[in-house]
């Protein structure tokens, strides 16, 4: 029986994870559930899954959660705040942690799970983007393993020989990450001037949280994934390529020196990657509609439009710069996306904010958590200042 903590339980990845867990009560038991502020949703999940620990990240919501759980007759322990998130990730109640908090908010719990030697199922890509070397060191210290939940990295993981092989020795020439291209594939900058959050979040193939949906629309999601692949598979940037594949059926590919190209295919449903990682090396039913190749009939591939979707190139540049540059990239992106979702920043100003932020702040070696958190905080402040300037410019130029 695997004992699982789900961090970010009320989100899209959390829901897909709990769907798999519910299908296999003989294999998986949820022992901790954590969320940000959605008390009603978390209390409902606690009533259904009966964890030992329920964590609400925002301490202001703790008493309401307690009241709801008492009302529902749920007797689990309740805790709140950052230390409680760490306890949910690293406590003795679990052996497996699903790290599915969105953004930098998930960094410390993800690191704590790794350091505690848990089997870490990583969806929280921002954590590895910010602090890849620290996460790898924490994994080595804890002796646990990391299994990627991001569909592309899960596909690459399935196409590589076991573990974290030396790519050159394993005969790997390239890792090819597929990208759907998002809702604005084929459009040019002039078409994107007045894009609304609703349009940006209407992804053609996936239903996801709002932040990652905007990242998919800007192609920053793929940029974050290039950095994620670099750390997960110890792959130099020049061996990681992005290919746009609008159908989202081929989830990624690995090319070997003998000309073999291995790919993982499936319908676009995150439950495949999650079930794979939860049960690995076994396989379990995931409730996913079987792939009907005859119905799909064709698979298309095209080059990404780097001139229109500048975020992908910014991510490659941050990766090349190294040190805290990827933490700065992530922080500036989180601030810019939040401002866009709030209606405070135009869509095309997202890359502009990140570019200015990267240019203005010098990257240093990301030696420890304090350095990374400091880079994150400084970049957020700088991004806020840039966002204020850019939104003032927009309002001035409005008729
Ligand atoms: P979501 O917005 O649907 O859910 C986010 C979860 O994080 C919620 O449970 C929320 O309560 C929690 N959370 C947010 N802020 C928090 C905070 N400050 N403290 C504690 N918890 C907090 O997001 P999602 O789409 O499920 O994505 C989660 C992560 O998985 C992201 O890093 C995303 O990039 C990654 N991911 C998602 C998908 C997908 O299909 N949704 C695919 C690949 C990777
Ligand atoms: Mg992905």
Image (tube, grey):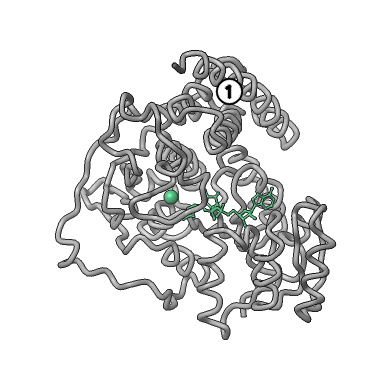
Is 307 displayed left or right of 57 in the figure? Answer: left
Point out residue 67 in the picture as x, y percentages from the top left corner.
82, 69
Instruction: Look at 56% across and 71% down and name the residue there.
Output: 18
Instruction: Residue under label 1, please give it.
Output: 387
Residue at 49 percent of width and 70 percent of height = 280
Left or right relative to 184: residue 48? right
Which residue is at the front of the view, 312 or 309? 309
- Which residue is at a point 54% across and 66% down the rendered structure image? 15
Is residue 239 visible in the rendered structure shown here? yes
Spot the residue most to the right.
Answer: 63
Please rate how many residues cluster around mark 1, counting C-alpha atoms within 10 Å: few if below 14, some from 14 to 19, many from 20: many
Indicate if the residue with disc 1 has its beta carbon within 8 Å of ligand 1. no
Could you tell me if residue 323 is visible in this image?
no
Please state, as top left, top right, bottom left or bottom right, where the C terminus lies in the image: top left
Residue 141 picture location, percent across and down: 69, 52
In the rendered image of this protein, does residue 355 appear above or below residue 107? above
Q: Is residue 111 above or below residue 398?
A: below
Q: Quadrant of the N terminus?
A: bottom right
Question: Residue 224, relative to residue 282: is it above or below?
Answer: above
């Amino acid at each position: 029986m695997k004992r699982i903590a789900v961090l970010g339980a009320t989100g899209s990845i959390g829901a897909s994870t709990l769907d798999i867990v519910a299908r296999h009560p003989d294999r998986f038991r949820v022992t901790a559930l954590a969320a940000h502020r959605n008390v009603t949703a978390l209390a409902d999940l606690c009533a259904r899954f009966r964890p030992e620990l329920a964590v609400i990240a925002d301490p202001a919501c703790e008493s309401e959660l307690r009241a709801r759980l008492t009302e529902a007759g749920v007797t689990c322990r309740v805790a709140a705040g950052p230390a409680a998130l760490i306890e949910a990730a690293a406590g003795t109640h679990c052996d497996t942690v699903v790290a599915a908090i969105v953004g930098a908010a998930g960094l410390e719990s993800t690191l704590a799970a790794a350091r505690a030697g848990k089997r870490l199922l990583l969806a929280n890509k921002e954590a590895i983007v910010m602090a890849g070397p620290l996460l790898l060191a924490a994994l080595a210290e804890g002796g646990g393993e990391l299994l990627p939940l991001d569909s592309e990295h899960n596909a690459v993981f399935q196409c590589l020989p076991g573990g974290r092989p030396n790519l050159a020795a394993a005969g790997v020439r390239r890792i090819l990450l597929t990208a759907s291209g998002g809702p604005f594939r084929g459009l040019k900058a002039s078409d994107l001037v007045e894009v609304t959050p609703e349009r940006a979040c209407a992804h053609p193939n996936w239903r996801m949280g709002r932040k990652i949906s905007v990242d998919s629309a800007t192609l920053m999601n793929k940029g974050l994934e290039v950095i994620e692949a670099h750390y997960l598979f110890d792959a130099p940037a020049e061996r990681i390529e992005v290919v746009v594949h609008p159908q989202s059926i081929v989830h990624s590919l690995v090319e070997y020196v003998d000309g073999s190209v291995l790919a993982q295919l499936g319908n676009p449903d995150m439950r495949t990657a999650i079930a794979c990682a939860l049960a690995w090396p076994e396989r379990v039913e995931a409730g996913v509609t079987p792939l009907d190749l005859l119905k799909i009939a064709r698979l298309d591939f095209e080059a990404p439009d780097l001139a229109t979707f500048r975020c992908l190139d910014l991510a490659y540049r941050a990766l090349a710069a190294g040190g805290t540059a990827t933490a700065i990239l992530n922080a500036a992106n989180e601030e810019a996306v939040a401002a866009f979702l709030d209606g405070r920043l135009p869509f095309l100003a997202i890359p502009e904010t990140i570019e200015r932020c990267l240019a203005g702040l010098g990257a240093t070696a990301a030696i420890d958590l304090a350095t990374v958190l400091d880079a994150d905080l400084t970049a957020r402040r700088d991004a806020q200042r840039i966002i204020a300037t850019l939104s003032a410019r927009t309002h001035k130029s409005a008729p």
